[in-house]
Amino acid sequence: MFRAVISLATSCTDRRTVVALAACLGAAYAYFYQAGGWNQNSRFALVRAIVEERTLRIDDTARVNGRLITGDLAWHDGHVYSDKAPGLALTAAPIVAIARPFVADPSSPKGIATLSYLATVITAGLPTVLTAVMLFALARRLGATRAGGAFASAVFGLGSPAWCYATLFYGHALATACLVGAFLAAVALGDPSDRRRDGLLAAAVGFGGGWATVAEYPTVVAAAMIALLAIANTSAEGGARRARVAIVIAVSALACAAVLAWFNRATLGSATELGYRHVALFEGMSEGFLGVTYPKRGVLIELLVGQYRGLLFLSPVFAAAPIGFLLLLVRSNRPAALTAGAIAAYFVLFNASYHYWDGGWSYGPRHMACSLPFLSLALAPLWSVAKPILRTGLAVIALYGAGLTLVAVSTTAQPPDTYKRPVTQLLWENFSQGRLSIHRQSYLEDNLQIERNPDTHARNIGERLGLDGLASLAPLFVTWGAVGFAWRRRR
């Protein structure tokens, strides 16, 4: 789907920088296994139902010994379904089906942990690496220096909650990658082109925005903004090209919509019915449109600067994003800058309008996850024009955010919502004492277990190698050091 987009990324960037960036991020995401939770259990139950039982019902796969392992469920005609958007599960199902014969006893707790780890790395970790690479390409295309593009990508990949989401079987990472791929293709349509290239790029816009919506429903508004940008970028060359691009975008997006309509009809009896209308434990979904009403001032403040979910508390470098957007408007591609800023603002306002704005067990404002690469993009031109003293300040606060995210991903990327100051009350307290991988849910249980099971609960690769405490992070730092050394030598 993103073949044309990837070719754009490798043709307009320093490939050594891209390879080093991808290697560091890939190692960071694959290093941690966060195990289960209501959100992941609901999605992976659907994956197992598709692969093991050839059905979309999760009557059996969402239960262990007759007990439900998640509350994120839709009930219809006496059957149980996942209430989540199906895009992630539909993407992961073929991966699990291919890998399953190679896993010893794939239905055992250890086998399910192995398959869920593999599915998470490929459908959440790998898309986040791809997002960072495309973000670097976007920054370079919009006039940023190589260092500016690398800074923006590193902030997104390691200095924001995106690192946590890349290790969780949620839909946000996949949806984010699809949106950024569509955005890169839309920007590239502003170049003179031929019919074949136009078709590939327009298909990337349509499929990217469409599958992002199938993976996370709120992205539909951002996908529409990107489609309008793509069409606007072709207007200067006449109506024929504009119409051709618009038709390809529409057909590609409708193909994704057809998959969603089929899924809804097969599960809930109607092509337009969504699982969130059939949940039992979330009464707030009855407010407004599936829980979305209007932005609340208090919620907005908490989402931005609060210690509970505040993005600027966790990644203060994003406070400089408005200045970066202004630089993009003045010095670069105005339509692209306006669209990127509008997408970032949309997700912030959407999150502030949602009844369950805190995201449950979450690190940071996860319903704003898809805004993170667009906020990061604004940092690239700022770094590119900044004086050394300002770059030093940006680097320091970016490292602060990366440090906090490392603490979270090492302890738990899913701090319970009972902690109103999770960084100080839970994450740092455990990290400073060397208590890592503290999450005690698995894909076969929804209750926290006091006793840790190394086969099914959260863990990192260092722990699997026999290292304990903070020492278990040493292999990750050694890997980063090796990549950095090789990059310097190649330069």
Image (cartoon, rainbow, N blue to C red):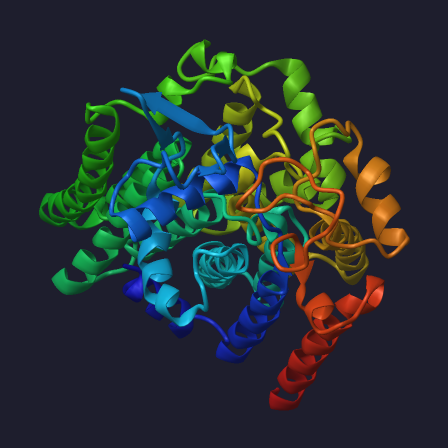
Determine whether 325 is above or below 166 in the image: above
Q: Residue furthest front?
A: 65
Q: Position of residue 145 (x, y in %)?
A: 57, 66
Q: Residue at x 75, y 50 (%)?
A: 411
Q: Position of residue 125 (x, y in %)?
A: 51, 58
Between 163 and 74, the one lying in front of the other is: 74
Between 23 and 62, the one lying in front of the other is: 62
Image mark count: 0
Q: Residue at x 33, y 45 (%)?
A: 49
Q: Position of residue 19 (x, y in %)?
A: 52, 76
In the picture, which quadrant includes the N terminus? Answer: bottom left
Between 194 and 165, the one lying in front of the other is: 165
Q: Residue furthest left?
A: 240
Q: Residue at x 66, y 28 (%)?
A: 303
Q: Position of residue 308 (x, y in %)?
A: 74, 30
Residue 420 lies left or right of residue 48; in this view the side is right
Using the rendered view, name the quadrant where residue 37 is placed: top right
Residue 130 lies left or right of residue 209; in this view the side is right
Residue 344 lies left or right of residue 297; in this view the side is left
- Is residue 28 among what the camera can see? yes
Q: Residue at x 47, y 51 (%)?
A: 332
